[in-house]
Image (cartoon, helix red, strand yellow):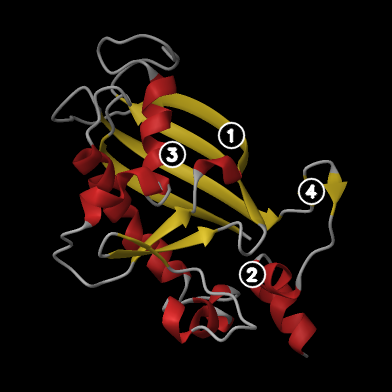
Amino acid sequence: MNFRLLYEGPIAPRQRATLPDIHAIRKAFDPQVRELWQHLPLSAESEKLLKHPHEVPTNHIGILERRGTTVFAPLVTKRLELMCELEIVFLRKQAPGQLIGDGDGGDIDNRIKTLLDALSMPPLAQQRHFEDATSSSVIHCLLQDDSLVTKLSVETDRLLRPTESAHDLVAIIRARVAANLIVGEFPRTSTRSNVKLTSSPRSYWHRRT
């Protein structure tokens, strides 16, 4: 399954980004990942996978996880034995390149760390920061955690429009989600669930007919 996500706004280097900064970026991706669940192949499995933990039958898998009082729905999870490859294009006011450096919006390496944190649900160590959620809505995100990213490529280019700060950019993220066929040193076969989720809409309908 292949798709693209888009982000426009500030992404600070990880050492400067606060947890609220990261969560703001995470919430910016929520409507896009939520919309993805409305289309095949995810829509065919959404009713089963997006149940709250207390509603999931013992022989089924649910993907919702709670941090404090906030519920998250990561698409790429260990429960579904999925992995993800990412191709990221950063459009910035700076010239192409400048991957390392702390001035004028450089330091792409640490800004990628911020982005990966925002694409993931918060780790358990941050649970106390989500104890007082003001919304009961589930937050959809791409990753359960960034260890599920098996391949990452980054390209930079110049953004040809004004920005409010040096950390403002446009991120175009191409994601490829596939079944994880390796655990440790041992191969595994695909499961029925992860084959359905990673199929293209055309191949999904082909199997149904």
66 or 177: which is nearer to us? 66
Return the disc, 3 or 4, that comes first in the chain's sequence.
Answer: 3
Return the disc, 2 or 4, that comes first in the chain's sequence.
Answer: 4
Mark 1 → mark 3, Cα distance in angstroms: 10 Å
Vertical relation: 123 (above or below) 206: above
Disc 4 residue type?
Ile
Could one spot residue 51 in this view of the protein?
no
**Percent x, y for residue 161?**
23, 31
- Give me the disc on residue 116: 3
Return the disc, 1 or 3, that comes first in the chain's sequence.
Answer: 3
Vertical relation: 21 (above or below) 56: above
Residue underneath mark 1 = 152
Residue underneath mark 2 = 197
What is the residue that sits farthest to the bottom in this orientation? 209
Mark 1 → mark 4, Cα distance in angstroms: 18 Å
Could you tell me which secondary element the residue under label 2 belongs to? Answer: helix
Vertical relation: 125 (above or below) 203: above
Could you tell me which secondary element the residue under label 3 belongs to? Answer: helix
Return the disc, 1 or 2, that comes first in the chain's sequence.
Answer: 1
Could you tell me which secondary element the residue under label 4 belongs to? Answer: strand
Disc 2 residue type?
Leu
**Percent x, y for residue 99?**
44, 15
Say left or right for 95 vs 59: left
Residues under numbered marks 1 and 2 in contact, where contact means CB atoms less than 8 Å apart: no
Return the disc, 2 or 3, that comes first in the chain's sequence.
Answer: 3
Mark 1 → mark 2, Cα distance in angstroms: 21 Å
Q: Residue at x 51, y 42 (%)?
A: 146
Residues under numbered marks 1 and 3 in contact, where contact means CB atoms less than 8 Å apart: no
